[in-house]
Amino acid sequence: MGNLRRILLTQLLTFHYIWGEWTCPGFLCTDGGCISQSALCDGTADCHDGSDEFEDTCGLLQCKKDEFACGSRRCVSLLFRCDGTDDCGDGSDEASCHKNCTAESFLCERTGSCVARAKLCDGWPDCPVGQDVGADACPSGQTRAPHTCFSSEFSCGDGQCMPHSWRCDHSPDCADASDEDDCDQNECLVSNGGCSHLCVDLPMGFLCDCPAGMRLVHDTQCEEIDTCLDTDVCNQLCVHVNGTFSCDCHEGYLMSPKTGECKAKDVAQLVLSSSEGVRWVNTAGMEYREMAAHLLGPGPMAALTANRTLYWARPGQGSIYRISMDGKPLDPVLLLKSHGAVLGLAVDWIHEHLYWTNAGTHSIDVARLDGSVQRLLIGGLAMPTGVAVEPLLGLLFWAEGGSSPRIECALLDGQGRLPLITSAIRNPVAISLDMPRRLLYWVDSGMRTISRVGFDGQHRKTVVESNGYLDRPFGLAVFEGHVYWSEQATHSICSADKHNGSLFRVILPNIAFPGALVLIHPVLQPKGSAVCGNTSRVCPYECVPDLFSGTGSPSFTCVSPTGGGAAVSDTTYAGILSLIVVLSVLLVGGALWWWKDVFKPSRTLTFQDFSLKESQDPLIHGP
């Protein structure tokens, strides 16, 4: 029977080679394969022998002067040449990148880039494939661990952090395979196996479980079941009572009677950076204008809506500029210079601070919006990329790539770090906040997806999957019911439904290497009192940040309006207010007694509606 199958297959292949030229409806590969005509010369080898992309078939590839011609017949920006990432798909943009490194630097084998010897064996892979922390660079096999793994992670012998769920899964994930050592023990006895709630030991390995009313996510974490978020039935506010839903919108939005979507009262501006300058378009894609043609490059951006000021960083450098978004294009003003490439920018519009991720110092830095003073806020990061702030809640968010990609949050002073995403993530390049729903969105160029998670690290969901327009995403923004992103492989600006990725459309095509995106609308930076420091209580006075004193840790202080810089505690303020109320009652009672005794009125004075209303001060009743 087997011989008969081989004979039939041989005859079929022979018939295909002889008659394929006339029967193939598309392009006939030189190896006999048949592909669609639309796949011919598209930069991807669809024939097994790659003949659909041969120069004899497609002719000489013509790229722009600021582009590199890949062997795969793609055109990529010269900025991506020798950056350690295979943008061509065949590695041709990373070939022949060797440089002459000095005696004080280390040569990365793959790209030829140079790494300072002071960074060798520091636990952070600065070379694309980590040779600077490998055995060749570190003969002793010892590297300095840059940080301690989280409780949900397993620490490899070389200091690398892996999810606990990868422990004892019969597949070595650590470089030294230490995650498969001593697998006959009860893993639940060590940090509860990394499980957030219940840990069940098995003969080989373990399982995490959750109590009733919760579900398991990412193998180790339990989260409460939230029907509103699971079903995305509401666009913003959602109240689930007795099996029914009630939807509402935040201030500044109106609910559409047809779609139920919360729409802002005015159309927002979508500002984008590119190699041809900074431009803006409205979210409907109907109006497109040039704003700053001299800001060249797909650099990161942020904006202060109150005075319509844009902040932009030159790609690959530490220079940050500001420019007005009103009137005719103006020359940019150099705000500050940072030591290292700026990859992400964010504006705290309440305290007027500028945050950015610094690839050179592996840190998150902060400065005043006038650029007068700056400082490193959070250090020891691997490859920080995107950054975002929510000053009304006092939260700072950032994303990291590198060997241990993750998304974390902390307070605005850098204290109280909390990991939000540590698994099923490869290369998060940008983040954006949906403040009305308290959700963080991120775009992952490695996974080719756009996902979201709650500010508490729960309710994770992938909303947009690879659709041909997520091969090389760069910028990200969320507004109303949509998510917007820039895509450098297709040179386009795209949008989709923020809940499930439906309603996909290309807003702007043919953009020369689009970069960051910023949405401009007053509702995105609402006024209000900020949470002050490491407390959930809103400051009733002025929340004064003390981030640049140079002495001690950065902090926020709730300062009284009487001056003197003294902070008034909740207990002291409540006591003072109570004393004032008591004295007021005594004073009123004394005045009435004096009136009755001196003037001796002929009729009895009747008190009507005299009562002390319950105080609405947040310091007494809490938030």
Image (spheres, rainbow, N blue to C red):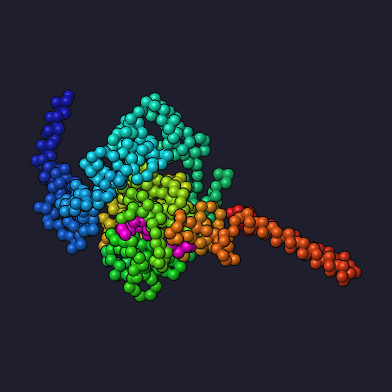
Q: Name the residue furthest bottom.
A: 328
Quadrant of the image for the C terminus?
A: bottom right
| Residue lying furthest front | 551
Up the image or down, 267 lies above or below 426; here it is below
Q: Between 109 and 166, which is closer to the camera in this rendering?
A: 109
Whether residue 340 is in magenta: the answer is yes
At horizontal 55% and vertical 63% (from top left) the residue drawn is: 565
Residue 403 lies in quadrant: top left
Residue 504 visible, this angle = no
Question: Which range of residues does the magenta coloring cover?
Answer: 339-358
Residue at the right extreme, as displayed: 602
Residue 262 horizontal/vertical position (percent)? 48, 58
Q: Main secondary structure of the magenta part?
A: strand
Report the label total. 0
Indicate left or right for 226 with 516 as reference: right
Left or right side of 162 for 91: left
Write the residue at 38% across / 71% down.
Answer: 324
Q: Position of residue 507 (x, y in %)?
A: 34, 61
Q: Position of residue 224 (x, y in %)?
A: 50, 42
Q: In front: 464, or 181? A: 181
Horizontal and vertical percent for residue 105?
22, 51
For image coordinates 15% across by 33% down, the residue present is 9
- Asked whether, in this view, residue 305 is left or right of residue 344, the answer is right
Q: Quadrant of residue 34?
A: top left
- Residue 298: say if magenta: no
